[in-house]
Image (cartoon, rainbow, N blue to C red):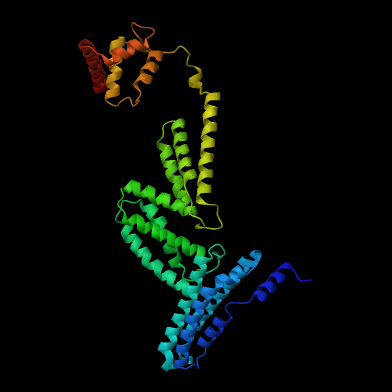
């Protein structure tokens, strides 16, 4: 009893093969005994058949059962690629095996035939993109043109982007995809990879043509690579290193958590271009970055919880009623704090919160408990004798520094 796969093939055969005639025409191109006139006739016949296929193939697809359309379409897609590869292989035939008199016409017909077959593939990719197999290897003729274009683009991009203050490591990562392919001329390339590279080149050229500041351009490039789903290990590591560098500058766990929450928001709200991925075997860059950021957030939250549940020995010995004692009046202390705030020594921006905190945890030689309202009034209204007293205190402190 025939299996399901065999039944599917029989069904495709019964539906007809649309490229039978153009295959015959291409085989005639391979005929080394053909006259110049015959080759010219073939050229016209191939062009006419390609136009026929482009005008009638859509109607043929509509006549196929829905559950068989994808297989029918990809069967023809693979047949086109096989034709192109055979054409490329035959173009490498030693010249001595062909007539010298027909050499120019023959070479021109080979190029023309390849161009016409590629036109059908472009038509397939544009009009039947939902059925087009992006993960099939591109034909050899197409690969040669892609590599040539990549070489030219890499030189152009490096020249354009090097004019801007872009992070050298980020620039190297952007260009590495192009240079890596050029280093491996025998590497098989899929249509998905070609689409991704074309998208990368277009985006980089657009960024290079705009005017950006260095830091802003770096951010734009990073957003673009996230949009194009550049899920390489090298770029994922670059992204996590950037975030870790920011976290190292944060002074508190709360600040670290705020930075991570911001990055998680940016990544989560980013839009990834459909069908675009650098490495099909790996999760998307958005997924990997989101997971990494969440793990960092969970780690810091646990660390924060432990610090509250198990305070350090130093914290355990601080009594609840402990206060800083200043040998100053409330007026002098208020102006002293204002001096440190206005000169940027104290970085707190919310003065009300600062006054409220100090009123709670500070006492002076005359006041065991400082009134918030009294502190606030004296903070904003300092008398001359108060300023003089604080000036003398600071001179005493400077004298100590100079002598020790």
Image location of residue 390, percent across then percent down? 25, 15
Q: Is residue 305 above or below residue 394?
A: below
- Taking the view exactly as shown, the residue that stands out farthest to the right is 1
Q: In this view, does 371 lie above or below 237?
A: above
- In depth, the one of 267 and 330 nearer the eye is 267
Q: Is residue 291 above or below residue 324?
A: below
For the point 54% across and 65% down, the residue is 128
- In depth, the one of 344 and 229 nearer the eye is 229
- In depth, the one of 52 and 141 nearer the eye is 52
Instruction: Report the side of 116 relative to 391 (left or right).
Output: right
Quarter of the view holding residue 74: bottom right
For the point 54% across and 28% down, the residue is 305
Image location of residue 187, percent across then percent down? 50, 68
Locate the N terminus and report the quarter of the image it occupies: bottom right
Image location of residue 230, percent across then percent down? 47, 54
For the point 54% across and 74% down, the residue is 56
User: From where the camera sits, is residue 175 visible?
Assistant: no
For the point 41% across and 57% down, the residue is 174
Instruction: Report the side of 265 relative to 68 (left or right).
Output: left
User: From where the camera sits, is residue 60 visible?
Assistant: yes
Image location of residue 165, percent across then percent down? 31, 51
């Amino acid at each position: 009893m025939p299996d399901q796969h065999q039944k599917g093939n029989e069904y495709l055969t019964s539906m007809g093969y649309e490229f039978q005639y153009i295959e015959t025409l291409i085989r005639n191109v391979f005929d080394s005994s053909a006259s110049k006139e015959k080759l010219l006739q073939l050229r016209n016949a191939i062009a006419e058949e390609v136009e026929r296929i482009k005008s009638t193939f859509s109607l043929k697809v509509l006549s196929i059962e829905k559950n068989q359309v994808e297989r029918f379409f990809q069967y023809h897609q693979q047949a086109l690629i096989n034709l192109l590869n055979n054409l490329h292989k035959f173009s490498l035939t030693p010249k001595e095996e062909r007539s010298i008199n027909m050499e120019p016409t023959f070479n021109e017909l080979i190029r023309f035939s390849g161009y016409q077959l590629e036109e059908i593939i472009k038509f397939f990719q544009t009009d039947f993109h939902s059925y087009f197999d992006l993960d099939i290897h591109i034909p050899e003729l197409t690969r040669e043109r892609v590599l040539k274009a990549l070489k030219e683009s890499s030189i152009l991009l490096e020249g354009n982007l090097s004019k801007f203050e872009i992070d050298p490591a980020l620039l190297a990562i952007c260009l590495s995809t192009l240079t890596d392919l050029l280093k491996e001329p025998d590497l098989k390339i899929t249509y998905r990879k070609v689409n991704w590279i074309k998208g990368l080149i277009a985006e980089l050229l657009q960024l290079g043509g705009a005017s950006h500041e260095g830091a802003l351009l770096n951010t734009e490039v990073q957003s673009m690579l996230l949009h194009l789903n550049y899920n390489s290990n090298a770029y994922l590591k670059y992204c996590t290193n950037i975030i870790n560098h920011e976290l190292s500058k944060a002074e508190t766990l709360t600040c670290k958590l705020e930075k991570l929450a911001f990055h998680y928001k940016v990544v989560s709200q980013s839009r990834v271009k459909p069908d675009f991925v650098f490495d099909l075997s790996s999760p998307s860059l958005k997924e990997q970055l989101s997971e990494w950021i969440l793990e960092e957030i969970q780690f810091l939250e646990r660390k924060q919880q432990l610090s509250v549940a198990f305070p350090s020995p130093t914290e355990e010995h601080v009594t609840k009623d402990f206060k800083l004692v200043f040998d100053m009046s409330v007026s002098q202390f208020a102006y002293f704090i204002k001096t440190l705030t206005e000169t940027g020594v104290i970085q707190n921006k919310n003065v009300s919160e600062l006054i409220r905190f100090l009123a709670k945890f500070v006492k002076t030689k005359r006041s065991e408990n400082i009134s918030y309202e009294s502190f606030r009034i004296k903070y904003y209204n300092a008398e001359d004798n108060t300023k003089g007293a604080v000036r003398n205190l600071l001179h005493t402190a400077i004298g100590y520094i100079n002598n020790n």
